[in-house]
Image (spheres, rainbow, N blue to C red):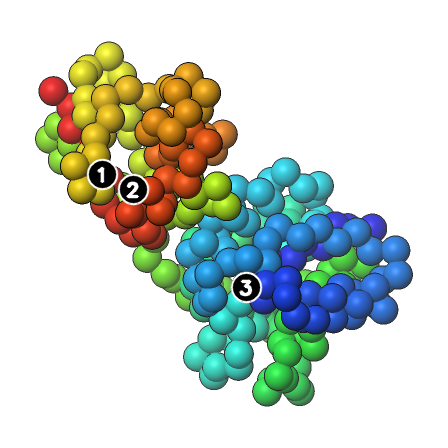
Amino acid sequence: MSVITLTTDLGLKDHYVAAIKGAVYTLIPDAVIVDISHQLIKFDTGSAAFLIKNSFRSFPNGSVHIIGLNDEHSPNEPYLAVQSENHFFVGKDNGVFSLILEDLPAKIALIETENKYAKFPVKEIFVKAACHLAKGGKLEDLGGEIGSFAQKMELVAFIEKDTIRGAIIYIDSYGNLITNITRDHFMKMGETRPFLIDFGINHTINTISRTYSEISEGEIVAVFNSSGNLEIAINKGPADTLLGLKLRSTIRIEFQ
C-alpha cells in the first residue's frame, strides 16, 4: 500500500486534519498517512512547495502527496493529479506544482467531480483521488489528461559581478532563515575568496560554519543545510525575531 502524505495550512487546533485522516481510513483502513506539515502560513503556496520539494523524494516510489491549501473552487484553477518521478501529487492548480517539480511531469490529469463547490475540497475531493492512486488506480481514470499546469515564478538568487543576491524563502520552527542561495551559487563565486554576508539592519557575517554549535550560544551562524541552501540562524535562538527578518527579506553575499 502506498504512503499518503498531507501538507496543509489547517493547523492542529481544529477537527479538520482528523476529518481528512478519517476519510482516508474509511477508504483504505490500513493506509499509511504521514503529516509533512499543517502549520503553514495561511495560503502560502511557496512554503508548502518548499516543504514538499525537500521531502517527497525521501518517500517510497508510488507515494501520494496531498497539497491542501488555497483549495477553494476556482474555474481558472482546476483540481489536478500529477505524476512525476514515480510519485503522485494531488491539489489545486494554483501554481504550487510548478514550484515543487523541476522536470516536466510524466502525466497531468484533471480531477473530474460533480462536487466542484465542496466546502472541504481536501476531504471531499483530494482524498478520493489520492486513495484511488494509492490503491494502484490509473491517473487517467480521474479525468482527462492535459499538457501543463499553471506556472508561478519562484524567487531565485542571482549573481552580478562580485555579489550573490538572494532572499529568505522559508522560516522553520526554530526561527532559522532559509534562503534561495545555494552551495552551488557560492562555489561558482569561489569558496576561497573573502566574503561578507549582509542581512537585516547592520547585520553581517564573514564565515560559513559546518554546524550551528561551532558558534557560541546566542551568536549568529551561517550554514549550508542538508538541502544545500544557505541558512542564517542563531545558535539556540530564533533568528527571525531577534534579527527582525521575514519571508522575502534580502540576503547578499559580497565577495572581495
- Amino acid type at mark 1: Phe
* Disc number lying in front (3 or 1): 1
Question: Within 10 Å of the Cα at label 2, are there few (<14), some (14-19), or many (20+) other Cα atoms?
Answer: some
Instruction: Look at mark 2 in the image and give the residue it sits on.
Output: 243
Compared to 165, does 206 lie above or below?
above
Query: Dot 2: what SS?
Result: helix
Q: Confirm or deny contact between disc 1 and disc 2 (CB under 8 A).
A: yes
Give, as a three-letter code, the residue at label 2.
Answer: Leu
Cα distance in 3D space between marks 1 and 2: 9 Å
Query: Which residue corresponds to mark 1?
Result: 199
Can you give x and y, in whole percent of width and height, for residue 244 in the image? Answer: 28, 47
Camera sees residue 138: no
Kindly identify the residue that appears in the image at 46 percent across and 61 percent down.
41
Image quadrant of residue 242?
Answer: top left
* Mark found first going from the N terminus, 3 or 1: 3
Sequence-first disc among 2 and 3: 3
Give the Cα separation between the discs numbered 2 and 3. 26 Å
Question: Total marks drawn?
Answer: 3
Looking at the image, residue 63 lies above or below residue 194: below
**Residue position for label 3:** 9
Image quadrant holding the C terminus, namely top left
Q: Nearer the viewer, residue 204 or 89?
A: 204
Mark before the other along the chain sequence, 1 or 2: 1
Amino acid type shown at disc 3:
Asp
Q: CA distance from mark 3 to mark 1?
A: 28 Å
Residue under the point 29% across and 42% down: 243
- Horizontal side of 4 relative to 241 (left or right) equals right
Q: Is residue 10 above or below residue 113?
A: above
Secondary structure of the residue carrying tag 3 is loop
Where residue 82 appears, x then y in whole percent? 58, 59
